[in-house]
Amino acid sequence: MRQLPRRILASAVLSVAAAGGLMAGGVLLGRPLIRDAAIATVASATNHAACEADPTSWGADWGGYSLYAYDSEGRPSNPAAPPLEPAQRQEAMARGGPARSVTSDDQMISVVPMAPDGPCAILRMRSTTPDPKAMRLFLGILSVATVAGMLLSGVGATVFVVFPFRQRVERLSEAARGVGRDGFAATDAAGDALGNISAVLAESHARIVENRRALEERNKALEEHLTGIAHDLRTPLASLLLSLEAVADEADGQLHDEARRALADAVYLSTLVDNLHQGARLRHDFDVTSGLVELTELVTRVTHRFAILGRHAGVAVASHAPDTPVWVACSPTLAERAIGNLVQNAVQHQRGEGHVAIVLQVDEAKGTFSLVVDDDGPGLPEDLAASMDIESFHTDAARQRGPGLGMVIAAEVARRAAWTLSWEPLEPRGTRARIRGPVAGPHEGSP
């Protein structure tokens, strides 16, 4: 866009130069036509009736110019008239128009037929031929003046018409990019087409802002409703988990199997409620790094919770962590939710008896931690990557039972906390989920 003014100016200059050159060439090539037109103009201005009334005295000689009348045979009525050139007379009568010739003393003789017969049937005009140098100078001056005038006109039109128009279009384009965003303002209040477009953009902006505000209010109400439901479900779900765990410990046979399945469903439902609640917080751009969490204690707590579920499912859950605290910058509830989702995914996807190991390590030299969740289950499904894609956070796939929402929340928490979450297969079977990230600095020690 910055090169546009130069292109416009260059185009204007070239166009004007071409037009001026064509005009000058037309003048040079059309000199005979111009002369004929001048002669015809003089002849048409001649008072033919006065000549017919008194042909013997009609005519004049003004030094370098003279004008006399002759009959169709070339005979003058005025005795002062010079002889009429026979060849020019015949040419003029044959052409029905002016016949010109130049004498040896640079006199131009023009013979013009005026009527079929009578004493004033033919006019003879004599004039001095213009000096060729003066004519060239005149034509040169005329051409330069014409080109200069056209150039000034082109530049003036470019500066006062094209440039302002271009600036208006650019402002309108910039305003169009801001429609629906904060700070938008209509930039053109003129009553022409561009002004109308600006008014339409302003109306569209107002409509988009109104619709966005309505959607935000509706989403906020829905999220608040969801948060309330999740909060109300926590207490009865906790009581249900304790009851089902007690039944599973006491029961035998088929009742034990039914209680174990019910306990797994209750754990899933409790996790789903927590994921919905934390997902609502993430959708509102919650600052994940707004707090500090101690990972050693968190790993112990998560291991204990899922060891109960694993015991009834035939899955052994164990962990290893450093003896010293490991502090990282993250919301404690979101960090526990993300790591808990990884462990629950490893436990739930075991087929029969299996093992899940949680290992927390710290690289003090690099100031980083590594948290690994290993399982010896069937391995990572090929379509699991799509479910873990952060774009799935707002899709129906994230609500499906399985890795869906829980894994997506884990990936989102890791991304916002500046951690990396990776997946890799284990040999001969199993999956490893690994979280890496920086530990909190010395000045960010325990609260």
Image: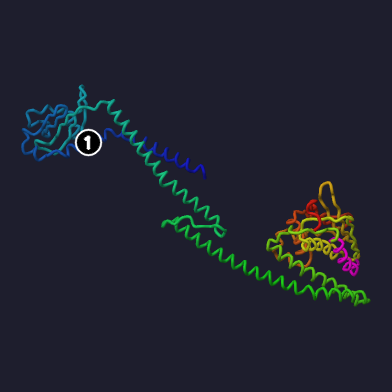
Up the image or down, 198 lies above or below 14; here it is: below
SS majority, magenta = helix
Determine the residue positioned at 76% across, 66% down.
275
Q: Is residue 308 magenta?
A: yes
Determine the residue positioned at 10% across, 34% down.
71
Up the image or down, 160 lies above or below 381; here it is: above
Up the image or down, 294 lies above or below 73; here it is: below
User: Is residue 383 at all visible to an observer of this figure?
Assistant: no
Q: How many marks?
A: 1
Q: Secondary structure at mark 1?
A: helix
Up the image or down, 62 lies above or below 211; here it is: above
Q: What range of the chain is rendered magenta? A: 298-314
Point out residue 422 in the picture as x, y percentages from the top left corner.
Answer: 79, 54
User: Is residue 205 at all visible to an observer of this figure?
Assistant: yes
Q: Judge by depth and name the residue closer to the eye, 349 or 167.
A: 167
Point out residue 53 in the picture as x, y percentages from the top left corner.
Answer: 6, 39
Instruction: Identify the coloring.
Output: rainbow
- The quarter of the displayed image where residue 132 is located: top left
Is 81 positioned to the left or the right of 254 in the image? left
- The quarter of the displayed image where residue 329 is located: bottom right
Q: Is residue 323 magenta?
A: no
Report which residue position mark 1 lands on. Answer: 38
Quadrant of the drawing holding the C terminus: bottom right
Determine the residue positioned at 33% across, 34% down.
143
Point out residue 207 in the picture as x, y percentages from the top left corner.
Answer: 53, 65
Is 308 positioned to the left or the right of 97 in the image? right
Point out residue 99 in the picture as x, y percentages from the top left corner.
Answer: 21, 32
- The quarter of the displayed image where residue 231 is located: bottom right
Question: Looking at numbered disc 1 in the image, what kind of residue is underneath it?
Answer: Ala
Q: Residue farthest to the top?
A: 104
